[in-house]
């Protein structure tokens, strides 16, 4: 045994590979780890204030406390806006303003933390017996994924494959069979050394991950039910968080050990180092990448299913077929009985492989037969791996973005067409488009089943593509209501439609201040959307809040932006009026909030690199800000009640006489003319 250990770790450089594995595992875990709920981590101290009061099971007292606190914070926000309005209008003194503002801001100090705890409340109340309040980032990082640890797989491959293949490569296998302690005795030592080494390394990896998440996020409340994590929201297994970690660790350990046994068996059967390496890799990688998220990946793939173990504890998952408009099962919960049967089968197969291995390594001469069959197998496996590496999904890329303003969310114009909401008949408002050259107006939505759908009276466009929102109406009961939302993309070159997002609407939920982030999108409602825009990766819905939906994964995240009708988007930054009427923006690339220095506005309009805004510090006069050099100037020395812009003019309503005017903002002089004010 000592000789085999020395050969594996010294002569075959196993100790070097183990050291690299440990170092790389630590580095990758530190560098790549991101909290599952980033908003929880960003407001951790404020969140903890409320978590201490509600941690654990949801009770009537806990629920009433959250609802009362919601009302209190809502009222404080309303009162704070009134205080600012009164101060800007000159109705209160600065001392009164500061005193009242400080009091209200003290009430709102932990607002972000409350929003996070309220999000959990919306999830927990769906099943209060199986879902508890707790800080989830630690347990989510430890359990809420089905990733394969490629570093461990790679280490096992380079550590185990040479154990027997090295002897065949050096033609020492026959000599070993003639020795007193060769043959079966030597094979048993090698097998025990491999299995023990793999078990120790895997357990070390599990222990280090547990220690990492425990120190970084905390792993308290391990006795809470597994369904407290939204990743396992539909599971029916009555286990705790700590029990799940222990069970999955044991199953994964068996998976890695059986994978090691498979490598040993293939190395003795094939007797070729390279071919054994490719065959062992293919057994893991082909089903991992080829079977997607199906539960079959856990049942019919042998060692791989056990190595991914977390999926054994998930519940049923559904997706929507966009053609039939029906839900279909994409992942079926794996019963406990099936898990035990699978473990039993893997154990039996592993023992059978080891038994055959020992028979092949007994003191009997075996002449290696060189045939072309092994070569054909090797070539086939290599081609499969290459094909998997070459396959992928392509997507359309648009480099430029048209400016989006919420004020003009009912119209869009590109080089050929003007798209807008036709309100000539208020009982039948519809989306239409006008051919700019010919002046012909046609319906944009051409579905034959108009009575079963509802089209949102808003439109978004970018270049040659225009988008609209469609609701499917449920008429099965006494009331008609939308039960599914779809975002439709129209290619204005061919007018072909494509659904880029679709989701059922849950109408039973309540939301706090429009600021809700639910990891499980089944508990999210979008039936009050009144505007939207999008980029290559996400769709941004404007309703009670701004909800960012990942176009690939469907994950929903709330961006804490007030929806007061003042929202604009330039392809990267979302501009809005924040607290204290400060002009602010959210960078969708860096995920950071910023304010435009020294700009106070009650209303604004974004146009290329300019922002037109009403300045309350100067009596609601109209200003323009250049975003390139951050210079600003007054363009209208009148008190303005309202305004909007198009490609040529600024349209405004004079506060003094309530008359409507327009000015050309491309000329420095403020030349205005009276017009009919249009909204």
Image (cartoon, rainbow, N blue to C red):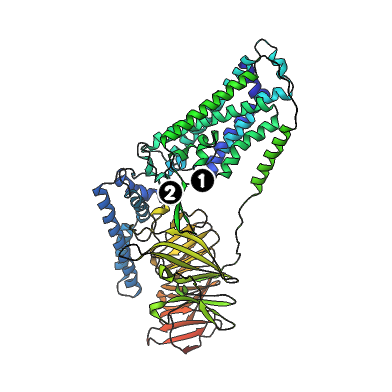
Would you say residue 117 is visible in this rendering? Answer: yes
The answer to whether the residues at label 1 and label 2 have Cβ atoms under 8 Å apart is no
Crowd class of label 1 (few under 14; some 14 to 19; many from 20; radius 10 Å): some
Task: Say which quadrant the N terminus sits in.
Answer: top right
Q: Where is residue 536, by image quadrant?
A: bottom right
The residue lying toward the viewer, choosing from 182 and 546, is: 182
| Percent x, y of residue 140 | 44, 43
Element under disc 1? loop
| Percent x, y of residue 476 | 34, 62
| Percent x, y of residue 236 | 37, 41
Would you say residue 583 is visible in this rendering? Answer: no
Task: Say which quadrant the C terminus sits in.
Answer: bottom left
Crowd class of label 2 (few under 14; some 14 to 19; many from 20; radius 10 Å): some
The residue lying toward the viewer, choosing from 12 and 572, is: 12
- Asked if residue 379 lies left or right of residue 627, the reply is right
Q: Which residue is mark 1?
A: 293
Element under disc 2? helix
Q: CA distance from mark 1 to mark 2?
A: 28 Å
Above or below for 573 versus 9:
below
Which residue is pictured at 69% across the width and 39% down the height? 380
Q: Which residue is mark 2?
A: 41
Going by the picture, which residue comes out furthest to the top?
A: 180
> Of the residues tagged 1 and 2, which is closer to the observer?
1
């Amino acid at each position: 045994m000592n000789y085999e250990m020395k050969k594996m770790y010294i002569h075959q450089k196993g100790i070097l590979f183990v050291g690299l594995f440990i170092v790389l595992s630590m580095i990758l875990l530190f560098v790549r780890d991101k909290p599952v709920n980033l908003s929880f981590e960003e407001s951790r101290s404020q969140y903890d204030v409320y978590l201490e009061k509600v941690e654990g099971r949801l009770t009537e007292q806990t629920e009433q406390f959250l609802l009362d606190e919601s009302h209190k914070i809502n009222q404080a926000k309303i009162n704070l806006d009134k205080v600012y309005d009164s101060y800007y209008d000159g109705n209160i003194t600065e001392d009164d303003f500061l005193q009242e503002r400080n009091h209200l801001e003290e009430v709102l100090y932990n607002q972000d933390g409350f929003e996070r705890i309220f999000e959990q409340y919306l999830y927990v109340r769906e099943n209060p017996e199986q879902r508890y309040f707790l800080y989830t980032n630690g347990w989510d990082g430890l359990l809420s994924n089905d990733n394969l640890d490629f570093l461990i797989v790679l280490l096992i491959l380079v550590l185990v494959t040479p154990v027997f293949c090295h002897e065949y490569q050096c033609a020492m296998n026959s000599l070993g069979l003639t020795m007193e302690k060769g043959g079966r005795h030597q094979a048993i030592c090698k097998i025990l050394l491999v299995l023990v080494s793999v078990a120790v390394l895997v357990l070390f990896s599990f222990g280090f991950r547990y220690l990492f998440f425990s120190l970084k996020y905390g792993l308290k409340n391990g006795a809470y039910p597994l369904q407290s994590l939204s990743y396992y929201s539909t599971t029916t297994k009555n286990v705790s968080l700590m029990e799940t970690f222990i069970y999955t660790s044991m199953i994964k350990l068996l998976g890695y050990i059986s994978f090691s046994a498979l490598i040993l068996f293939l190395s003795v059967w094939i007797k070729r180092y390279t071919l054994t390496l490719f065959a062992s890799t293919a057994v893991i990688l082909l089903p991992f990448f080829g079977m997607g998220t199906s539960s079959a990946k856990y049942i019919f793939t042998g060692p791989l299913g056990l190595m991914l173990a977390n999926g054994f504890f998930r519940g049923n998952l559904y997706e929507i077929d966009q053609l039939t408009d029906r839900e279909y099962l994409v992942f079926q919960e794996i019963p406990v009985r099936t898990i035990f049967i699978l473990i039993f089968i893997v154990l039996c197969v592993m023992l059978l492989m080891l038994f055959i291995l020992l028979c092949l390594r007994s003191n009997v001469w075996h002449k290696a037969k060189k045939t072309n069959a092994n070569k054909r197998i090797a070539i086939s496996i290599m081609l499969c791996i290459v094909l998997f590496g070459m396959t992928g999904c392509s997507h359309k890329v648009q480099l430029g973005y048209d400016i989006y303003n919420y004020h003009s969310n009912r119209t869009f114009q590109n080089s050929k067409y003007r798209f807008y909401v036709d309100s000539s008949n208020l009982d039948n408002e519809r989306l239409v488009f006008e051919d700019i050259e010919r002046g012909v107006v046609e319906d944009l939505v051409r579905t034959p089943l108009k009575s079963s759908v509802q089209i949102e009276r808003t439109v978004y466009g970018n270049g040659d593509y225009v988008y609209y929102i469609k609701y499917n109406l449920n008429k099965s009961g006494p009331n008609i209501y939308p039960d599914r939302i779809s975002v439709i993309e129209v290619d204005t070159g061919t007018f072909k439609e494509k659904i880029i997002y679709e989701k059922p609407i849950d109408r039973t939920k309540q939301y706090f201040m429009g600021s809700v982030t639910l990891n499980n999108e089944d508990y999210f409602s979008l039936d009050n959307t009144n505007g939207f825009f999008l980029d290559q990766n996400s769709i941004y819905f404007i309703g009670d809040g701004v909800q960012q939906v990942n176009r690939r994964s469907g994950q929903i995240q709330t961006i804490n932006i007030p929806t007061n009708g003042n929202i604009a988007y330039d392809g990267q930054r979302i501009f809005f009026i924040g607290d204290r009427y400060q002009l602010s923006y959210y960078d969708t690339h860096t995920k950071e909030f910023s304010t435009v220095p020294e700009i106070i506005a009650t209303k604004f309009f974004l146009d290329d690199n300019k922002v037109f805004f009403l300045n309350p510090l100067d009596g609601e006069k109209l200003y323009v800000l250049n975003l390139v050099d951050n210079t600003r100037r007054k363009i209208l020395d009148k008190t303005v009640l309202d305004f909007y812009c198009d490609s040529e003019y600024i349209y405004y309503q004079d506060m003094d006489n309530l008359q409507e005017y327009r000015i050309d903002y491309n000329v420095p002089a403020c030349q205005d003319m009276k017009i009919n004010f249009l909204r």
